[in-house]
Amino acid sequence: MTKMPSLILLLLFLFLFLSPSTAEIKSLTINSDTRSMILFEKFGFTRTGHVTISVSSVSVTVISSAATQPESSRLGFFLLNEESLLQILIEIQTNPSFCVLDSHYIHKLFTFRELSPPPIASFNQSYPVTLPNEYSLFFANCAPETSVSMHVRTEVYNLDADGSKDYLSAGQTHLPSLYFVFTITYIAFMILWLRVCFTNKGSVHRIHMLMAGLLLMKALNLICAAVDKHYVKVTGSPHGWDVLFYIFQFIRVVLLFTVIVLIGTGWSFLKPFLQDREKKVLMIVIPLQVLANLASVVIGETGPFIKDWVTWNQVFLLVDIICCCAIIFPIVWSIRSLRETSKTDGKAARNLSKLTLFRQFYIVVIGYLYFTRIVVFALRTIAAYKYQWVSNAAEETASFAFYLVMFYMFRPVAKNEYFVLDDEEEEAAELALRDEEFEL
C-alpha cells in the first residue's frame, strides 16, 4: 500500500513539475535510498534514440531483521511513457503488492540480476529506443525493507542524420537557435533605447538607466542560455555556461521586479524618493528573488532523483506567487494616491493622464504575469513532446512584448502622458475623475 503515494507523487512530477530534460551526461550517487521508485529524467526520443546506463558500486542492504535477502530481479531500470503511466497506476491499485518491473506497459532495460559479481557489482549497457515518444527513466525497488546505494551514470540522446549525438530532447533541439534570435532582438532593442535616451537627454531619469541595464542583462541571459543549450546539444555538458546563465538570470529577474516596483511607485520621474511601505516591498521582493533563484538552480542542476526535489519546486512556485502579488501593490497605491491628489491640487487633466497611464500599466503587468505563469504552463503541459519549444517561444515572445510596451509607456520624451496639459479639456478631466472607472 505504501507504493501508491509514491506513484501518485511521480504522476504529479511528470504532469506538473518535470519538463523534458536537457539530458546532460549525468553522474550521481544514490546513498541508502529506500524509495520504491526513483525518477531520473524525462526525455523526448526520435526513432534514433539511445539510452546508456552505467551503474557501479551497487549494494542492497536489508534494513529490517524480519526481512529476507531480496531477489536481484526485483530491482532494476525501465522506461515509461506518459500513455502507459495510468495503466501502471491501475495495476498497482488492483494489486498493491504488484511489482512495476513485471508490467507489460514498461520498457524494461535491466535488473540487478545482470550485475557483475561482487565486489565490483557493476553494469554498463546502451539500449536503442525505436519507438519515438517521450519517456521517463525510472529505477524500481520492489524489495520491501531494503535500501540501495550505487553510482549511476546516464547518457540519453538522439542521433542526427550525420550520426552525431544530440543530447537535447526532441522538443528542445531548436532552443539554441531560438535563444540566439531573441538575443539579437534584445541587443537591437537596447541600442534603440539608448538612442532614445541620448536624443532626449533632458527627460532621462535614473529609472531609464535601470531599464537599459535590464535590457543588457536580458540579452546576456539569453546568449548564455543559447551557448549553454548548444554545448549540451553537441557534447552533453554545458562547459560552465550554466553558471553564467544562472548569474545573469538572477541579476535580470531582480532587476525586472525592481524596475516594475519603481515604475509603479513613480520613482525618479514623479518623485525622487520612496515611501517606507514602498521600500518594504523592495526589501521583501529582492530577498525572495534570491531564494527563488536558489531554488531554480537546485531544480535545474539536479533532478527528481533527489529526495527534496519536489520541495524545491514548491518553494519556487510559492516565492514566485508572492513576488508577483507584491509588485502589484505599488501600482495600486500610486493609482489611489493620484486619485486622492486630484481632488485637491486642481490639475485634473494632468492627473487624468497619469491615472490612465498607471491603469494601463497595471493591466499590462497583470496580463504579463498571467500569460507567463498560466498560459505558458498550459502550453508546456498540452503540447506534444516534439513541440515543447513552442512554450519557450511563447514565453520569450510575451516577455519581449511586455518589455516593448513598458518601455514605450515610460520612455524619456519631452512631452509624454505625465506632462500633457490641455486647459480646454480641464473640465472634462474633472468630470472623468469623479467617475469610478479608476477604482481597482
Image (cartoon, helix red, strand yellow):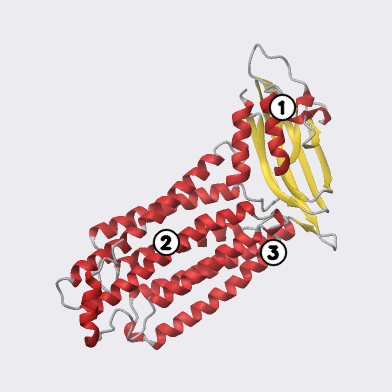
**Is residue 181 at all visible to an observer of this figure?**
yes
User: In front of the other: label 1 or label 3?
Assistant: 3
Mark 3 Cα-neighbour bin, 10 Å: few <14, some 14–19, many ≥20: some
- Residue 103: percent from left, percent from top: 77, 31
Q: Amino acid at mark 1?
A: Ser
Mark 2 Cα-neighbour bin, 10 Å: few <14, some 14–19, many ≥20: some
What residue is pinned by disc 2?
Answer: 366
Give how far apart the Cα atoms at labels 2 and 3 are: 30 Å
At a point 14% along the width and 72% down the height, the residue shown is: 344
- Residue 219: percent from left, percent from top: 54, 70
User: Between 421 and 43, which is closer to the camera in this rendering?
Assistant: 421
Q: Identify the image quadrant of residue 326.
A: bottom left
Give how far apart the Cα atoms at labels 1 and 3 are: 40 Å
What residue is pinned by disc 3?
Answer: 174
**Residue extending furthest left?**
344
- Residue 213: percent from left, percent from top: 44, 71
Q: Amino acid at mark 3?
A: His
Image position of 248 with respect to 17: above or below: below
At a point 52% along the width and 70% down the height, the residue shown is: 400
**Is residue 116 at all visible to an observer of this figure?**
no
User: In front of the other: label 1 or label 2?
Assistant: 2
Side of 154 relative to 190 (left or right):
right
What residue is pinned by disc 1?
Answer: 59
Q: Earlier in the sequence, mark 2 or mark 3?
A: 3
Mark 1 Cα-neighbour bin, 10 Å: few <14, some 14–19, many ≥20: some
- Secondary structure beneath disc 1? strand
Image position of 367 with respect to 20: above or below: below
